[in-house]
Image (cartoon, rainbow, N blue to C red):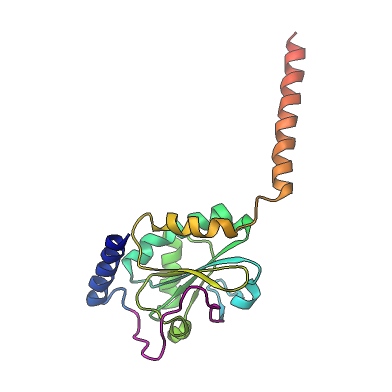
Amino acid sequence: MKSRNKMKLAGSFIMVLAGLCASTPYAQALPVKEGVPAPAFSVKTLAGKPLNLAGLKGKVVLLDFGAVECPPCRIEMPALEALHKKYSRRDLVVVGLLEMNPTRAAAKSMLKQRGITFPVAIDARELIGKRYGLEAHPTTVLIDRAGKIIKVETGYLKGDEKAMEQAFLPLLSPLSRSIKTTGKESDSNRTRSDANITRGAG
């Protein structure tokens, strides 16, 4: 695990030197820690909808800080989209915040290219990033239903989403009873239909 973290940090440093995934230095802000309340924020998504963290209490939030010109961020986004599609019915909310002041056109173009449907907003002047004390992009923050930070992951290597998935799975709601019931009813109807076909054939 330590060697993996070193690999990710080394990759992040290389990207910082290349000017691709560097975050603005936040001398006045320390990185957020696990076990503390997540700093509040309010934004308008690229779809024009208001979104604030306080309004998501009662949900499990996967908050991802990325950047348009950050290769690891672009690689990570489809993995986040897959989690969004798989677990949104179980109260997981994936939220993306784009740093480094991209244009709306560039941001929308990237989301379209990557097939992203979860809510994404531009963090204007990186004000939210300052509150979270970002060190590099991407940074993913897992927030529980009470608004407490459970896990912080900096950098991305393929497969990291599996560790994050294991971290949030115990926090999610079980599949709703209506979904399970619908599935059982469908199976029951299919069985009756098969039985009727069998009788007709006889």
* Quarter where residue 114 is shown: bottom left
Q: Which residue is more in the foreground, 131 or 70?
A: 131
Name the residue located 62 percent from the left edge and 72 percent from the top edge: 146
Name the residue at the bottom extreme.
Answer: 28
* Quadrant in which residue 153 is drawn: bottom left
- Viewport quadrant of the C terminus: top right
79 versus 101 height, above or below: above
Judge from the rendering whether residue 58 lies leftward or rightward of residue 17; answer left or right.
Answer: right
Q: Residue at x 74, y 47 (%)?
A: 178
Give the tally of numbered discs. 0
For this orientation, the residue located farthest to the top is 202
Position of residue 147 measured from the top left corner of the image (x, y, whole percent): 59, 74
Residue 200 in the magenta stretch? The answer is: no
- 33 left or right of 91 in image: left
The front one of 140 and 42 is 140
Q: Which residues are drawn in magenta?
A: 23-40
> Which residue is at the front of the view, 149 or 23?
149
Residue 37 inside the magenta-drawn segment: yes
Q: Residue at x 46, y 76 (%)?
A: 33
Counting from the top left corner in percent of width and height, residue 92 is at 58, 61
Q: In the image, residue 24 lies at what x, y percent?
A: 35, 84
In the displayed structure, 189 sits above or below 183; it is: above
User: Does residue 179 appear to the left or right of 11 in the view shown?
Assistant: right
* One can see residue 25 in this view: yes
Which quadrant of the figure contains the N terminus?
Answer: bottom left
Magenta span: predominant SS is: loop
Q: Position of residue 73 (x, y in %)?
A: 37, 66
Q: Is residue 202 above or below residue 53?
A: above
Image quadrant assignment for residue 15: bottom left
Tell me what residue is drawn at x 35 percent, y 63 percent: 156
